[in-house]
Image (spheres, helix red, strand yellow):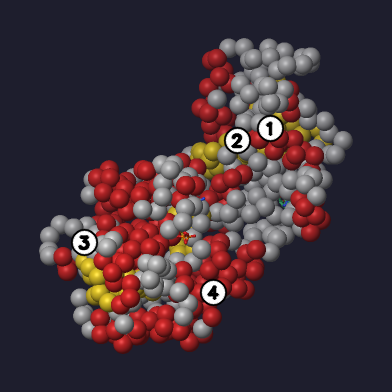
Amino acid sequence: MTELLTAAQMRAIEQAAIASGEVTGLELMERAGRGVVEAIFEEWPELAPSWGPAPKPPEFSGQDEEGHRAVVLCGPGNNGGDGFVVARLLKEAGWAVEVFLYGDAEKLPPDAKVNYERWGEMGEVLPLTPQASLELAHRHIVIDAMFGTGLARPLSGLGPFLRDICDCVDAGGSLQLQERWPFSPPVVAIDIPSGICADSGRPIFDEAAAERIRRGSSPVCAAANLTVSFHARKLGHALALGGFWCGKVVCADIGISSQASRTLPRSELVKMANESGSRFKRNGHKYSHGHAVILSGSVGKGGAARLAARAALRVGAGAVTLGCPPAAVIENAAQLNAIMLRAVKGVDGFNAALEDDRINALCLGPGMGVSDESRGLIEAGLKSGRAMVLDADALTLIGRDALLFGMLHEKCVLTPHGGEFARLFPDLAETLAAPATTGPAYSKVDATREAAKRAGCTVLFKGPDTVIADPSGRCSINASVYERSAPWLATAGSGDVLAGFITGLLARGFAPMRAAETGAWLHTECALSFGPGLIAEDLPEELPKVFRALGI
Ligand SMILES: NC(=O)C1=CN([C@@H]2O[C@H](COP(=O)(O)OP(=O)(O)OC[C@H]3O[C@@H](n4cnc5c(N)ncnc54)[C@H](O)[C@@H]3O)[C@@H](O)[C@H]2O)[C@@H](O)CC1
Ligand SMILES: Nc1ncnc2c1ncn2[C@@H]1O[C@H](COP(=O)(O)OP(=O)(O)O)[C@@H](O)[C@H]1O
Ligand SMILES: [K+]
């Protein structure tokens, strides 16, 4: 678990470090540039100085034929300043370096200006204008230092360069992949690929650029094989398409002493999990670990609820009961063993079941249907005040019904995917879907926080960038990107399993926000542990292995 920062938080951390006298801005920029160069040599050891002469790019006929060659594209802010440092350090390592500047050198901020001038003593700076000829195919590395956390508006006049950069990245960014592109150099983005908003992971573009995308011409942002960020990952590396554009993200330590960016070791995660709610099972009888009730749909519609029930039991609820319409009892009885089964005849039947005060968590929605009876069941569940996961059809019903929406309470967890989120919060979904024309752009974090506040309960907005927020504004992201990428989670029923994990954790006494965070994290862990080929049924069955690996 790693804390992600917004651009403003990063600026505040930097300013605090400078104000305390701990470091100067110029030193930070030097460390940032050094961090980029070190990350490059670590990623591609064959480029490190000790490796001897560089492979000769094909068709290259300029000077320095035996040396490594880099092109550094600098922008008008401090991201560009980092670029000038990288250019200088590579040159000092014996590289041939060509530097381009987008913008006016006179207007560079002070630290970037100093580094521009330092570079100026070693080499020239060419203007990055439409006339510039980059000849990327003749380099060993391309450095994108055009824009970082300060991106404020759409890029303009950079289209052809962005196309070249994206082509290099598409070609694999490997020094070995020479057949596909004459000599496709890896692209290294400083902080974030230019054009991507560091707070939202969304490209910033206007209508004119949108039209260009529709025509399939130039892209609106750069991409990278390696992104080197500083101090901590930013939200934009994890949200939306950030994971898609950034390639691999490494975080260079620039020596700022802030607690903000700690990466928690697994042992600490386990400790946190143990401290929240009713702990992992140590002692007590089954009902001391809670009793979850999951309602299923009618005949032939029980699969989703059975998946959720199995997940709730595996995650450690002491007892799980599946409640179904009387007509569906035989179908469910044929499928269930450890999970108890109870015929629930309409709302009255549900209210009767809820008289058992050992029942402390409910899950409504998976496979439930959107009938009036389903609505009544949701109302009864909400009136009972129990901790409760509302998923799938329950979300559709709540989205249609202001009265039900108004009954949501702080022990509820809503688990919408994109479509369900749009039904529940159409205005927020619309804002999120509208092209982002200025930075920082409205993000999935903004939308989920606002949704949780409005609903008065925890909201988990699903996707590879699952965002979880509670009404107090607390928010976390379960990003299934980079080393935690598990696209095989996009399989029918995996959302039902997630609902079951959260319900089981609620039954065990986890607070709603913690249950949602832990459930989402375990969901991804199970997918990673199982690997491709996974179907929803496999997720709960993988949990014991995941728990064992965690030492639980
Ligand atoms: N904050 C920190 O702690 C550190 C920041 N560093 C670097 O500084 C960067 C942030 O620097 P800045 O805040 O100067 O931001 P940027 O370097 O991203 O650029 C901002 C500048 O570009 C202009 N601009 C924004 N969008 C534009 C567009 N589409 N077209 C033309 N001009 C545009 C802005 O008006 C501003 O002048 C980081 O990404 C990182 O690379 C590092 O030096 C290390 C420390
Ligand atoms: N590409 C992906 N990478 C990681 N997780 C994903 C991806 N696509 C979907 N998921 C996760 O899989 C689950 C799918 O849930 P949902 O959309 O409700 O599907 P279903 O209704 O079929 O169960 C969610 O937890 C979501 O976050
Ligand atoms: K950049």
Q: Report which residue position mark 1 lands on.
A: 168
Dots 4, 2 in contact, CB < 8 A: no
Task: Return the x and y of residue 267 as percentages of the image width and height.
Answer: 28, 46
Dots 1, 3 in contact, CB < 8 A: no
Residue at x-position 80% and y-position 50%: 215
Q: Report which residue position mark 3 lands on.
A: 338
Task: Return the x and y of residue 442 as percentages of the image width and height.
Answer: 62, 63
Residue 416 lies, with reference to residue 357, above or below; the image says above
Q: Give how far apart the Cα atoms at labels 1 and 2 are.
A: 9 Å
Q: Earlier in the sequence, mark 4 or mark 1?
A: 1
Q: Secondary structure at mark 2?
A: loop
Residue at x-position 49% and y-position 52%: 490
Q: Secondary structure at mark 3?
A: loop
Q: Earlier in the sequence, mark 1 or mark 3?
A: 1
Which amino acid lies under the numbered mark 2 shown in the image of this protein?
Asn
Question: Can the viewer see residue 80 in this picture?
Answer: no
Q: Report which residue position mark 2 lands on.
A: 225
Of 314 and 425, the residue lying toward us = 314
Which amino acid lies under the numbered mark 3 shown in the image of this protein?
Ala
Q: Give how far apart the Cα atoms at labels 4 and 2 are.
A: 37 Å
Q: Report which residue position mark 4 lands on.
A: 424
Question: Can the viewer see residue 537 in this picture?
Answer: yes
Quarter occupied by residue 415: bottom left
